[in-house]
Image (spheres, rainbow, N blue to C red):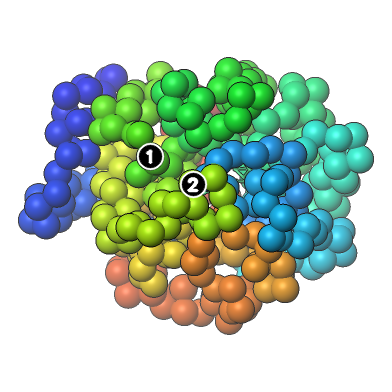
């Protein structure tokens, strides 16, 4: 059933601690009934910070010259993939800045084929590589990737315009989502909360957008200002606690409204509170994307400020994460892809 907008606005407007607690509890109950309490890991490799775009909020936008630009070599990506596979992670994610040149498209394609081969097809592969043509998406799909994450960032085209330069197109981003769905990818999108100029009604419309586009997965998180961006003036006065609350509230409301989709508890939550991702699980999320990028690259992949685990590598993180998940009474779906039940029903 299409969610009721007034009810969404009501949930998204809650602020009293006891009311928020009740919202998270309700979302957790629905999570239990629809997707269960198994958490799925997707090890994420931040493949490259080279980006052709200039989103006003993002720390790796093209015009930020305070980054050393890198692209991880094939050997290193395969090493990370092998590590994730041997840790029994069900899946991995390749994320990077956006580019569409022929060399890059075929580089990604080779990576997909090699990862598929080394893990004997066992490791699920998610891509988060921005807007691409139908032809490219078909190529990558044929080489073994099956999920794609591309956030619409905001479903309000006017607000989108305010957050991007004139040559960035809301329509094209939307088209990529629709093409992915048409080609049969398991499709994820999402938005940031707390964007300058964003209203509660915008967020309610975002959730209706997810419903109308029949989305399988969501990755959402609070906007966290970065000093070397056009929105850098917002660093001063940024309220971490409020940002965390808004991020959790959006997860909970999406779980209640959309039910059987996969929802990631994102790193941005962890940036705001060391246990932010566990809080996300308790508010209705069921996916965690542990960062498995070699630590030497991480300071150059700061989409926002305060990204955690700058100098802690994946093998150091793995046991503490496991313990923390067990401490909230959940289990980890090792060796399982953990596709969204929503996607499976659609097939
Ligand atoms: N280039 C690809 C993938 C990398 S960016 C793309 O744009 O899809 C991944 C996500 O990081 C973006 O979708 C955006 O929602 C998020 N992001 C960028 N800057 C951010 C910030 N300052 N605070 C929080 N999230 C941010
Ligand atoms: Fe590039 Fe993605 Fe950042 Fe936009 S959000 S500047 S596309 S990395």
Direction front: furthest residue: 233
Which residue position is annotated with label 1? 196
Q: Nearer the viewer, residue 247 or 343?
A: 247
On screen, residue 9 versus residue 276, left or right, reads left
Which image quadrant: the N terminus?
A: top left
Which image quadrant: the C terminus?
A: top right
Write the residue at 56% across / 49% down.
Answer: 229
Disc 2 residue crowd, few under 14, some 14–19, many 20+, Cα 10 Å: some
SS class of the residue under badge 1? loop
Residue 226 drawn at (x, y percent): 51, 56
Res 148 quadrant in image: top right
Q: Nearer the viewer, residue 85 or 72?
A: 72
Dot placed on the residue nearer the N-terminal end, 2 or 1: 1
The circle on residue 231 is 2
> Are dots 2 and 1 in contact, CB under 8 Å?
yes
On screen, residue 309 versus residue 80, left or right, reads left
Write the residue at 54% across / 45% down.
Answer: 230
| Disc 2 Cβ-to-ligand 1 distance below 8 Å | yes
Residue 39 drawn at (x, y percent): 44, 58
Query: Visible in this render: residue 116?
Result: no
């Amino acid at each position: 059933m299409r969610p009721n907008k007034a009810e969404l606005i009501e949930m998204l407007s809650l602020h009293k601690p006891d009311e928020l607690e009740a919202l998270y509890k309700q979302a957790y109950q629905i999570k239990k009934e629809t997707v269960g309490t198994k958490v799925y890991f997707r090890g994420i490799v931040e493949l490259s910070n080279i980006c052709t775009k200039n989103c006003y909020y993002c720390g790796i936008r093209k015009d930020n010259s305070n980054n050393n630009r890198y692209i991880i070599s094939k050997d290193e990506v395969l090493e990370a993939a092998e590590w994730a596979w041997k840790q029994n992670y069900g899946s991995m994610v390749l994320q990077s800045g956006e580019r569409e040149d022929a060399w890059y498209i075929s580089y990604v394609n080779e990576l997909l084929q090699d990862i598929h081969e080394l893990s004997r097809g066992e490791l699920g592969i998610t891509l988060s590589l921005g807007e691409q043509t139908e032809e490219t998406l078909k190529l990558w799909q044929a080489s073994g990737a099956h999920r794609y994450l591309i956030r619409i960032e905001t479903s309000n085209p006017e607000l989108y315009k305010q957050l991007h330069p004139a040559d960035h197109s809301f329509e094209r981003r939307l088209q990529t989502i629709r093409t992915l769905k048409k080609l049969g990818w398991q499709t994820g999108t999402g938005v940031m909360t707390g964007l300058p100029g964003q209203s509660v009604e915008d967020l309610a419309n975002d959730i209706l957008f997810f419903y109308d586009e029949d989305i399988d997965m969501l990755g959402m998180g609070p906007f966290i200002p970065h000093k070397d961006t056009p929105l850098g003036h917002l660093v001063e006065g940024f309220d971490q606690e409020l940002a965390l609350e808004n991020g959790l509230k959006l997860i909970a409301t999406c779980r209640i409204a959309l039910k059987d989709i996969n929802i990631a508890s994102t790193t941005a939550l962890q940036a705001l509170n060391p246990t932010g991702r566990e809080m996300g699980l308790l508010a209705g999320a069921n996916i965690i994307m542990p960062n498995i990028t070699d630590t030497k690259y991480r300071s150059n992949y700061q989409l926002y400020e305060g990204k955690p685990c700058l100098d802690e590598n994946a093998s150091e993180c793995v046991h503490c994460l496991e313990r923390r998940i067990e401490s909230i009474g959940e289990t980890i779906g090792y060796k399982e892809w953990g596709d969204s039940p929503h996607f499976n029903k659609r097939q």
